Image: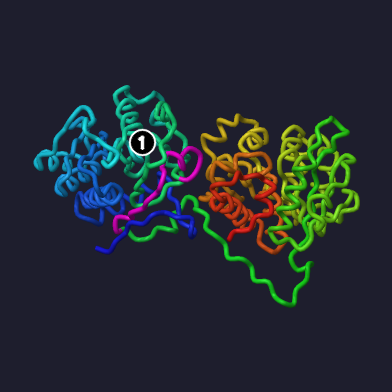
Amino acid sequence: MMARMQCILPDRPRPLHGLAATRAIEQEAAADLPPQTLMRRAGLATARLARALAPHARTAWVVCGPGNNGGDGLEAAMHLRHAGLLVSVTWLGTEARLPPDAHQALQRARAAGLVFAEQPPEALTAADIGIDALVGIGLAPGDAPRPPPPRWRALLQQLREGPACLLSVDLPSGLQCDTGAWAPGFAPAEGLRADCHTLALLTLKPGLFTAEGRDAAGTVWLDTLGIANQDARASAWLCGPSAPAPRRHASHKGSFGDVAVIGGEGLARRGMGMEGAALLAAGAALHAGAGRVLLALLDGAPPAAALWAPELMQRHVKALELQALTVVCGCGGGEAVADVLPAVLARAARLVLDADALNAIAGNAALQSALAARATGQWGTILTPHPLEAARLLGVSAQAVQADRLAAAHSLAERFGCICVLKGSGTVVAGPGRLPSINPTGNARLATAGTGDVLAGMVGARWAAGDGAYAAACSAVFQHGQLADHWPADRPLVASGLASKKIE
């Protein structure tokens, strides 16, 4: 059988399958194959990856749960024992309640002489391997209203904090397949380790790439277990890089669109000058390839563009021909942005709303109606909220947004008839009537002031240059994260540097 395993890199778009789609694929595949085939393939794949990740391992500890994920772990344990490792299995099932394939795996494991133990081997070292086969996708939303048993929590803590390399089978135990949120009681007590891996089986799950998933899963691998591609059943997509648009020699600055940035409340209004946010967005649009960038600072802010980028063209808001521009509005807008939003919402042909523009809309029913009305005309809108801004727009808590990021982004897109870019770990891009996309690039170095303003400017530039709204959002988010991933390790990431940085 041809090799199926691959390490998931941010190199191309990939389909993601939620719980319902994955179970349907699994059931159909199992019906066409001899009994136990998928479980045996999963166990073999897990053992092979374990050996590759810990080539010098002498000992393996496999924690197996009461369902099919535990059966996968038992199959892997048998292969590791045959490879010469000292294998210790901690099994948490009840034989009378086991699914048929897992029951067969348990019988085979006993016949093979596997050692079953209540606790991890004492001799585990950093060269060894620990395998989490406790839950997998067997924990659906709503299945765990109560925390897991104390023994489960204790074993997971030992796996996560122990010295051995950690490999999770299909999903880290307790991570929700569709959302990337932890089920109650499963979150690590002391944070997460860097040297963890997850082997996704059959499909890639959305929860591996957003919310808590990126930290929990570590390096993600995929083995399709020999089952044909199932793109048509995807629940979401993982973003990939977009090819840069070719620039013809016979072109001019007008060929690549005009971006206007409206924001930057002045110091005089409240003693809280925020011109820097607008400058960051404008500079990012300039370096992302916009033909011209116009900067409209609010509330009598002093001219500052020439001090930062002489290419920026300063304008008063009233002098902007909004119908002909891609407008980025809200960066550092403070209270002053509310004064210009009615006109911007009514007249901007292409509008990226960020930061204080979103907060102003969230607190004003008339502005919300004006935003929703844009979808009935020819105007396009992209929202770029972080979780708290999204929560204000939806009238919920930030915790509720983070509990299901894809659903929150979808709700905003449907409510306002727009593209929504929900920022955070695994940024989600959603649009009305289409599958959401999750971005795989970026890291915690982006958690610094101004990087969101940079993203808004990049989105505006891609849209102005000719990308469709959804494509512009996906490509800008991907490149924004990629810049952070390529950032020199010995230099702090600051937004002003990010705004002018090019991928080398």
Q: Amino acid at mark 1?
A: Ser
* Residue designated by label 1: 173
Q: Nearer the viewer, residue 165 or 251?
A: 165
Q: Considering only vertical position in the picture, is 471 above or below 171?
A: below
| One can see residue 25 in this view | yes
Instruction: Name the secondary structure under disc 1.
Output: loop
Tell me residue 93's x, y (percent).
22, 31
Q: Residues within 10 Å of mark 1 (few under 14, many from 20)?
A: many
Q: Quadrant of residue 208?
A: top left
Q: Nearer the viewer, residue 244 or 27?
A: 244
Q: Residue at x 72, y 45 (%)?
A: 353
Quarter that holds the C terminus: bottom right
Q: Residue at x 23, y 37 (%)?
A: 61
Q: Residue at x 40, y 48 (%)?
A: 220
Q: Which residues are magenta?
A: 209-226
Tell me residue 180's x, y (percent).
46, 39
Q: Is residue 13 magenta?
A: no
Left/right placement of residue 493 relative to residue 72 reads: right
The chosen color scheme is rainbow
Q: Nearer the viewer, residue 288 or 410?
A: 288
Q: Considering only vertical position in the picture, is 502 above or below 124?
A: below
Q: Residue furthest front?
A: 490
Tell me residue 50's x, y (percent).
27, 47
Tell me residue 39's x, y (percent).
24, 48
Q: Is residue 220 magenta?
A: yes
Left/right placement of residue 455 relative to residue 314 reads: left
